[in-house]
């Protein structure tokens, strides 16, 4: 995933990384921040004043979930939004409706 992020940023894309808590056990937050050039969070309670859990989904032009785990797919399919990534996915799904 770090290689994919590097390819996106080298191609000129502005990427916001929203890892799940489990994902940060495989690749650390510092790595994501260094590769994306942006702060990284997985909590809906960080930067509450910017309403990230809504704003990120509404502003996204494209969302890439890689790898998309069975757990995340099941939560998204049933409307469960217990972290920043699943909130962002649900907000993006309704942003242009």
Image: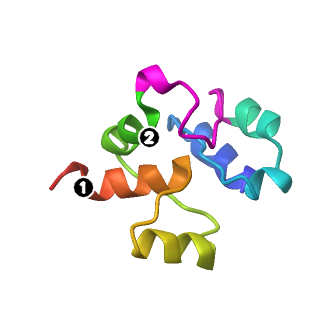
Q: Is residue 37 magenta-colored? A: yes
Residue identified by numbered label 1: 94
Q: Which residues are magenta?
A: 36-50
Residue identified by numbered label 2: 53
> Quadrant where the C terminus lies?
bottom left
Name the residue nearer the viewer: 44 or 4. Answer: 44
Could you tell whether 19 is left or right of 83 in the image?
right
Prevailing SS of the magenta stretch: loop
The reply to whether residue 63 is visible in this rendering is: no
Rendered position, 11 above or below 93: above
**Which residue, as the protein is rendered here, is positioned at the far top?**
49
- Name the secondary structure under disc 1: helix
The picture places residue 3, in percent across and down from the top left corner, at 74, 53
Q: Label 1 crowding class (10 Å Cα cut-off): few <14, some 14-19, many 20+?
A: few
Of pointers 2 and 1, the one earlier in the residue sequence: 2
The picture places residue 61, in percent across and down from the top left corner, at 34, 45
Q: Residue at x 80, y 38 (%)?
A: 31
Rounded to the nearest angstrom, the CA distance separating label 2 from label 1 is 13 Å
């Amino acid at each position: 995933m770090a290689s994919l992020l590097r390819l996106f940023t080298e191609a000129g894309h502005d990427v916001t990384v929203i890892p799940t808590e489990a994902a940060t056990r495989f690749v650390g937050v510092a790595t994501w921040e260094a590769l994306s050039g942006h702060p990284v969070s997985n909590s809906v309670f960080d930067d509450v004043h910017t309403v990230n859990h809504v704003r990120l989904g509404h502003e996204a032009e494209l969302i890439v979930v890689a790898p998309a785990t069975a757990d995340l797919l099941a939560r998204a399919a049933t409307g469960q939004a217990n972290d920043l990534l699943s909130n962002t996915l649900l907000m993006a799904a309704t942003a242009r409706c």
